[in-house]
Amino acid sequence: MKLYCNCCGKQIRMKENTQIAVEDFVVIEKSWGYFSEKDGIRQKMNICESCFDAWVKTFAKTPCETEEQELV
């Protein structure tokens, strides 16, 4: 299975013959509900790290960050 960044279209690198990514990326999933114009629609997208960083720079308020103590 091939994964692509929904922003730039770049293929997300996977370990050969597996479904294990060798680079990190963000997955956003949303099931739209009442009070939205997309009621009943589910959307899912993958965003590579460089597109995520560029996107976050456009935010009026930056996301809260905390440093992880143990990386798994």
Image (cartoon, helix red, strand yellow):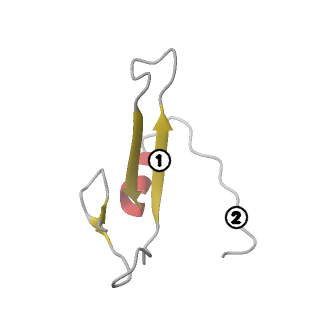
Q: Quadrant of residue 10?
A: bottom left
Q: Quadrant of the C terminus?
A: bottom right
Outermost residue toward the right in this view:
69
Relative image position of residue 30 (x, y in whole percent) = 48, 38
Q: Nearer the viewer, residue 4 or 41?
A: 41
Farthest left residue?
9
User: Label 1: how many residues lie within 10 Å, few (<14), some (14-19) or many (20+)?
Assistant: few
Tally of marks: 2
- Could you say which disc has been placed on residue 37 in the image? none
Residue 8: x and y, percent?
26, 55
Q: Nearer the viewer, residue 20 or 25?
A: 20
Q: Nearer the viewer, residue 47 or 33?
A: 33
**To which quarter of the image does residue 66 belong?**
bottom right
Callout 2: 10 Å neighbours few (<14), some, many (20+)? few
Q: Residue at x 41, y 74 (%)?
A: 19
Residue to which mark 1 is pinned? 28
| Amino acid found under the numbered disc labelled 2 | Glu
Report which residue position mark 2 lands on: 67
**Amino acid type of the residue tagged 1 in the rendering:** Ile
Residue at the spot 59% in from the left edge and 45% down from the top edge:
63
| Residue 19 visible in the shown view | yes
Who's the residue at 32% across and 57% down the image?
A: 5
In this view, 66 is above or below 12: above
SS at circle 2:
loop
Name the residue furthest top: 35
The quadrant in which the N terminus is found is: bottom left
Q: Nearer the viewer, residue 38 or 61?
A: 38
